[in-house]
Image (cartoon, rainbow, N blue to C red):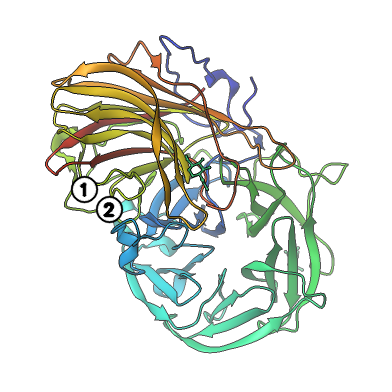
Amino acid sequence: MYIPGLPQLFLIAATAVGVSIAKPANLAPHASTFTNPILWEDYPDLDVFRVGDVFYYSSSTFAFSPGAPVLKSYDLVNWTPVSHSIPTLNFGNKYNLNSATDRAYVKGVWASTLRYRESNDMFYWLGCIENSKTYIWTSSGSGAGKSNGEVPPENWNWKPSGTINTCYYDCGLLIDTDDTMYVAYGNTKIQVAQLSKDGTSQVKSQQVYTPPDNTYIEGSRMYKINNTYYILVTHPASAEYVLKSKSPFGPYERKTLVDSIAGPLPNAGYSHQGGIVDTKDGKWYYVAFMDSYPSGRIPVAAPLTWTSDGWPQLVTDSNKAWRTTYPVPVQTSKTVPPPTGVDRFEGKELSHEWEWNHNPDTTKWTLLPNGGGLELQTATVTNDLFTARNTLTHRIIGPKSHGTFRLDISSMRDGDRAGAVLFRDIAAYIGIHKSSSAAQIVMVDHLSLSSTWSTNSTGTIAATGPTLPADAKEVYLRIQADITPAFSGTTVKRTATFWYSIDGNRWTQVGGGFQLSNDWTFFTGYRYGIFNFATKGFGGKVIVRSFEMELV
Ligand SMILES: *[C@@H]1O[C@H](CO)[C@@H](O)[C@H](O)[C@H]1NC(C)=O
Ligand SMILES: *[C@@H]1O[C@H](CO)[C@@H](O)[C@H](O)[C@H]1NC(C)=O
């Protein structure tokens, strides 16, 4: 089996019994070529930029919390999440997942923007929420400008910095060479706003471009390169156009960067809605996302060349297709941690790989001292996982991986349900249904949300595993998922399977394969998740000792 983007040495074969774990210690930082996708995880609507030696990447997260992750990279290929611009979603009460009718699935953080402003050492995040206001979050005092782009973890310092009463739909921030802040935004009618000196209010806004043929465009990213202003816009879900002008307010000319070009993966959509970024030595790259359901939208990169009159062009193969491999943009000995491996929840905070389903109830979870693990108390009495608070989710690495939770279930109470969920609008889980006399292992499938994101089904018990004694202490729960794209021009369905183990060595599958949905309308791809909710009353808890994600 060939897995793009990874040294093949590290691949392991999964067997039903006695899976051995090999760890990719690092992702070949000295390789001369890279393979698309650059990170096979769902990080859509990317905004990529560079500060010194460090590339940064902001992404949209809908109603997951914390929102708007910030990833970093030294080579534009290996990425790791280092922060979230929105520690707690401050867009209204429904982001707390209050009830079956008061919640925010698919709302929240859509395409938004992040930039570093050197003059005041501040990162600015801006995003329009629910087609209404634009929210601003800032992080000051990072020191990034003076330290080649590096931000020590303790220097991220995100604060809400107000709202602007205009929806900067799909916005892209530019901090000009004279420090003026501009935001390009809108769909079809592209606008540019100029912000006040502190970047928290609007000075003026002007329509700068409307396609003569009214082609639907959105996803603005704004740049100034060689005294010329550029706005990249996408025509979903196939094309990227470049708008170019000598003034931020236009008039803009338009050329096509990509339009329905093949690759780089089969059964995926066209790569589009990206941005451009340069290396320190002046090479330019286009980083875009590829619709890759059931994975979601995953990043791909390709080099650019420039015409003599200042238009970027994508480097493609001889068939004008996106290449699967290109030379690595930056050769560096600096590395970031790999996306796979074990998390034992030993830190003072959750790692930025994790996001809750909506804002969590912070009184109902804690990281135990001395690396004791993650304690999840039941936070909602419900029979509906989509209404239960404090489900913690983790992006799935593709194309095939498993996620394994080691769980202490000894403090579950009668009626509690805890488990490992393959989380999306059509979901399935392996878990424990606890009664006063036993801990029943179950596989539940076809939990579903309707097309308006109300709960359509709380799921059906598809299979049962053994009944553990009521005082059972530990169980390992594993989901193995194939999220290879099956989105475009195919009716292929990918499958996940559900496993448990008592000792962490011998694994037993419960239920059959669960077919993943290739639909895009929920936007977020499948995630691994851990949940614990009550159907009868509060007081129960589980402790998550570890989570391990490995390619298989
Ligand atoms: C910017 O201008 C310089 C000098 O003319 C040129 O070498 C460089 O290629 C230009 N860069 C871009 C991205 O057009
Ligand atoms: C709603 O749930 C039923 C029962 O599981 C299922 O047959 C149907 O396809 C679901 N509808 C949606 C929109 O998910």
- Pick whichever of labels 2 and 1 is earlier in the sequence: 2
Residue drawn at point x = 46 percent, y = 51 percent = 71
Reading the image, the residue beneath label 2 is 360
Give the camera-side residue of 51 and 257.
257
Q: How many numbered dots are placed on residues in this image?
A: 2
Question: Badge 1: how crowded within 10 Å, few (<14), some, or many (20+)?
Answer: many
Reading the image, the residue beneath label 1 is 379
Ligand 1 is in which quadrant of the figure? bottom right
Looking at numbered disc 2 in the image, what kind of residue is underneath it?
A: Pro
Q: CA distance from mark 2 to mark 1?
A: 9 Å
Looking at numbered disc 1 in the image, what kind of residue is underneath it?
A: Ala
Q: Is residue 183 left or right of residue 408?
A: right
Residue 436, x across and y down, in percent: 13, 27
Residue 312 in view, yes or no: no
Whether residue 176 is situated above or below residue 364 in the rendered picture? below
Which element carries disc 1, helix, strand or loop? loop
Whether residue 188 is situated above or below residue 390 in the rendered picture? below
Residue 519, x across and y down, in percent: 60, 46
Residue drawn at point x = 28 percent, y = 13 percent = 503
What mark, if any, has residue 304 been given in the picture?
Answer: none
Residue 259, x across and y down, in percent: 79, 56
Give the camera-side residue of 338 and 540.
540
**Residue mark closest to the camera, 2 vs 1:** 1
Contact flag, marks 2 and 1 (Cβ < 8 Å): yes
